[in-house]
Image (spheres, grey):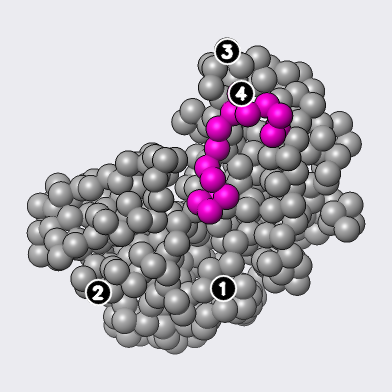
Amino acid sequence: MSLEYKKQFNLPEDITYLNAAYMGPLLKQSADLAKKSIDLKSHPWEITPEDFFDPIEKARHLIAQILKCKPDNIALIPSASYGIATAMKNLKDLPSGEIIVIEEQFPSNYYSWSELAIEDGHKLISVKRDMKINMTEAVLDSINDQTRIIAMPYVHWCDGQKFDLALISEKAQKYGAKLVIDGTQSTGAVHLDLDKVKPDYYITATYKWMLSPYTMGFMYIDEKNWNGKPLEHNWINKLDAQNLSGLVNYKHDYQEGARRFDMGEKSQFHNMTAFIAALEFIETTGVDTINKHCKELTNLIIKNIEDKDHKFYYWPSSQRSEHILGLYFKEQNQLEMTKQKLQNNNVHVSYRGQAMRISPHIYNTEEDIQRLCYDL
C-alpha cells in the first residue's frame, strides 16, 4: 500500500527520505497546481474577487474535518510563530504567576513566552526532560495555583517524546491556566481529541506532516477567545470584505468566529491550491491510517536495533510518538560515523539536540527502513 502512496510524490529511488519532521515533500498534484497558480499571477485579470475568499473557506473546512472541529474555530496563519504571537498578545496582563514550558522545546514556542514573562512579571518554568520519569506526570506536578500559561508541544520536535494533553488540560482547567499547544510535529500524523483537550490555542505550521507549501499554517482558537485581538488589522477579516468596491466604507466588526485572527494576504494565490490538495490528501487518507503506517515503520526500526542496545537509547513506548523516533547514541564517535554513512548512502534524517531524529511518513516503505538500519 505504501508504494501506491509513494507514487504520488516525486521521490527518486536512490533517495531514502525519512525526514518529514524537517520538511514534508509536496505531492505531485500539489506541485503541479502551485505552478499553475504562479502562472495565473502572470495574468492578474483572471483573478476574480471570489478567488480571495472561496479557496480560503474550502481550506478552513478541510482543516476542521481533519481536526474534527468547526470551521469557525480555524484561523489561517503563515507560521507557528505568528500563531504563538497571537496567543501571547491575548494572554497579556494576566496576574503575575508562572509560565510553564518544556525543556528544549522549539524556539518559536519559547521566545514569546520568555518575553512575556519579562513584560508581565511572570516566572518561566522549564520542565526538565528525563527518560527515567513519566514526563506527563512531571508537567502535572509543575501546575499549581500560580500557573497562568502552559505553552508546550503535543510531540517534542527533537525526538518524538509525546505528552498526555488530556490529563494536562484537566489540571490546567482546575487551576484556571491557559493552554497553548504547538501541534506542528503532530497535526496530520497523530489524532488529537480537541473535545477532551480543550486548548485555548492549538497552532500548526503545515509544511511538515501536512505536506503543504512553506509559509502556510493554521490555529484552532477556542470559542471563549473569539473576541480577542488579532495580531494585525487588515481589510480582509472585516465584515463585508467581499464587497471590494465598498471597502472605503470602513467596518469595525469582524467576520465570524476565529476569522478575525487570519493573517493578511491570506488568499495566498501561489500556495492555496497546493495547500488544499495536501489537505484533501490528508483528509482522504486519514490521520489514523498515516499514524498506523508510521508506527509500523518506527517499530520496525526498534526491532532491527534491539541487538544493538549497547549503542542507543530512546524514549519508552508509553512516552514515544508513533511517527518520530529519536535515537540517542551512547558514544559520540558512533553518532558521527553513522551520520557519515547515512549521508554517503543518501539516507536522510535529522539531528536535533543530541538525538538522531527519524521521521517516516505514508510514502515510506519497509525497504526504506532496511536501508536505514543497514547503516545503524
Residue 365, image x, y percentages:
83, 46
Tell me the mark number nearer the camera, choosing from 4 and 3: 4
Of discs 4 and 2, which sits in the foreground? 4
Does dot 1 land on a helix, a strand or a loop?
helix
Say which residue label 2 marks: 174
Residue 277 vs residue 365, the one in the foreground? 365
Q: Between marks 2 and 1, how big is the CA–CA gap?
A: 25 Å
Circle 3 packing at 10 Å, graded few (<14), some (14-19), many (20+), is few
Q: Which mark is residue 311?
A: 4
Tell me the amino acid under the disc marked 3: Asn
Mark 4 → mark 3, Cα distance in angstroms: 11 Å
**With respect to residue 104, does 151 lie above or below?**
below
Marking on residue 67: 1
Q: Is residue 104 visible?
A: yes
Secondary element under disc 3, as helix, strand or loop, is helix
Amino acid carrying mark 1 in the image: Leu
- Where does the magenta region start and end? 305-320
In three-dimensional space, the C-alpha distance between marks 2 and 3, rounded to whole angstroms, equals: 47 Å
The quarter holding residue 285 reads bottom right
- Earlier sequence position, callout 3 versus callout 1: 1
Nearest to N terminus: mark 4 or mark 3: 4
Q: CA distance from mark 4 to mark 1?
A: 38 Å
